[in-house]
Amino acid sequence: MNSKYNKILIALAIGAVALKLVSCTAIPKGAKAVKPFKKDRYLGKWYEIARMDFKFEKNLNNVTANYSLNEDGSIKVDNRGYNYIKKEWKESIGKAKFVKGEDEARLKVSFFGPFYAGYNVIQIDPDYKYALVAGNNLKYLWILSRTKDIPDTIKSVYLDTARKLGYETGNLVWTAHN
């Protein structure tokens, strides 16, 4: 009977780990998602100004993200970038859902079936022209703009916010748009 109990505990532990991997929707310590958040104003095209580099965006420039509504109320995420090494466009289409309510900019995004990652808008200007987005942890960070550049004043504020949260802003990749 003890063996059966141990197997149940192991299965529950494995299930908890799997659930954590499937729904990784954390926000970096000290970060707060924008609230109130206006989803409809956030939809549309954004240009990536800077990012913490990771394997899915390696060697990409001209990176954009288009957000639109899906019929089920989730948000369609259409990311595009040009791989300047392979000389080809790369596109990833996924979906995002709000973690809590639509008035808080904490989302989970998936490009791979049931696997979600955190997408947290932690700073945005009043006109929804510039955004600072944090992932699950200090490995993921994006600066976005509705245009191909960003004013130095906004850039400075966003970099300061990121540094205070513990991001190594010297590791940011500044995205070329040409």
Image (cartoon, rainbow, N blue to C red):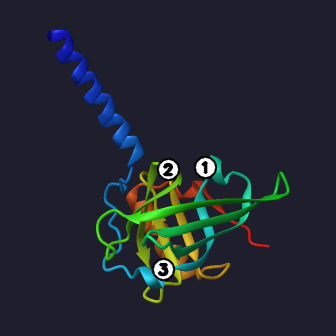
State the CA–CA distance, disc 1 to disc 2. 8 Å
Q: Is 124 rendered above or below residue 65?
A: below
- Counting residues from the start of the chain, the first of labels 1 and 3 encountered is 3
- Counting residues from the start of the chain, the first of labels 1 and 2 encountered is 1
Name the amino acid, label 2.
Lys
| Residue at the far front in the pictured view | 71
Q: Is 153 rendered above or below residue 32?
A: below
Task: Name the one closer to the observer, 23 or 134.
Answer: 23
Q: Secondary structure at mark 2?
A: loop
Q: Which residue is mark 1?
A: 54
Which quarter of the rendered picture does the N terminus lie within? top left
The image shows residue 174 at horizontal and vertical percentages of 66, 64
Numbered badge on residue 139: 2
Q: Which residue is mark 3?
A: 42
Residue at image x 64%, y 82%? 147
| Residue at the far bottom in the pictured view | 127
- For residue 152, which quarter of the picture? bottom right
Residue at image x 34%, y 74%? 102
Name the amino acid, label 3.
Tyr
Residue at image x 46%, y 55%? 167
State the CA–CA distance, disc 3 to disc 2. 23 Å
Task: Name the one closer to the observer, 72 or 89.
Answer: 72
Which quarter of the rendered picture does the C terminus lie within? bottom right
Q: Residues within 10 Å of mark 1 (few under 14, many from 20)?
A: few
- For residue 122, which quarter of the picture? bottom left
Name the amino acid, label 1.
Phe
- Counting residues from the start of the chain, the first of labels 3 and 2 encountered is 3
Residues at circles 1 and 2 in contact by the CB criterion of under 8 Å: yes
The image shows residue 11 at horizontal and vertical percentages of 29, 25
